[in-house]
Amino acid sequence: KRANLYDADHYVIRPYTVHHCKSLVARLPSTAGSQPPRFFVSHWWGESVYDFICCVEQFVRDFGRNYNDDDDRRGGGMTADTPIWVCAYGNNQWDLSDITVDPRESGFTKAMKEAEGRTITILDTEGKVFTRIWCVYELHLTLTPQDGANDDSEKGIWAVYTAKKHTYDYDTVQE
């Protein structure tokens, strides 16, 4: 439960990708071809991988329903197979030239546009995610209208998940 993404990069991602020097996603046989992400995941590498997975699993349950256009707009219809963008897996750890001087041109910003401004923040137990400049930038892009738009409909959707165990029962929600 203590392994974090720095550990995953050292012991899993880099050893698996070293001979081809590509991203983990590009190397996995089940992920061939384009996979536009439904959501962008904002997090820091120091959180536990176990906590990260617990948060994503709960997120998929919470965003699984897709009964109407509003559910669809907010990213509903998630399943275990729906692509989400996680930098450690989507970025080529051997060539980080995609992290540019101008963050608006970075792979992070491009992935957020692909995800239509839908962002999940994984809130670690110490709240360090909000001390990381890239995470703050990602939150800014999510909550600020982009491309000169002025109305609230152009803002993204922000979901925050913590490793604290929680459940939500849609059967008790009154419509």
Image (cartoon, rainbow, N blue to C red):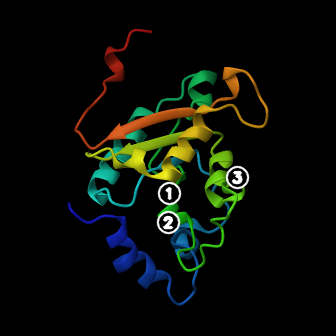
- Distance between mark 1 and mark 3 Cα atoms: 18 Å
Front of the two marks 1 and 3: 3
Q: Quadrant of residue 38?
A: top right
Say which residue label 3 marks.
104
Q: Is residue 81 visible?
A: no
Say which residue label 1 marks.
86
**Would residue 139 appear left or right of 175 to someone viewing this image?**
right
Which amino acid type is marked by label 3?
A: Arg
- Distance between mark 3 and mark 2 Cα atoms: 20 Å
Residue 8, x across and y down, in percent: 35, 71
Classify mark 2: residues with Cα within 10 Å, few (<14), some (14-19) or many (20+). Answer: some
Residue 1, x across and y down, in percent: 20, 60
Label located before the other in sequence (3 or 2): 2
Q: Residue visible at 53% across and 90% down? A: 19
- Distance between mark 1 and mark 2 Cα atoms: 6 Å
Residue 134, placed above or below residue 77: below
Q: Is residue 171 visible?
A: yes
Q: Which mark is residue 89?
A: 2
Classify mark 3: residues with Cα within 10 Å, few (<14), some (14-19) or many (20+). Answer: few
Q: In the current view of this chain or complex, which residue is farthest to the bottom?
A: 19
Which amino acid type is marked by label 1?
A: Val
Label located before the other in sequence (1 or 3): 1
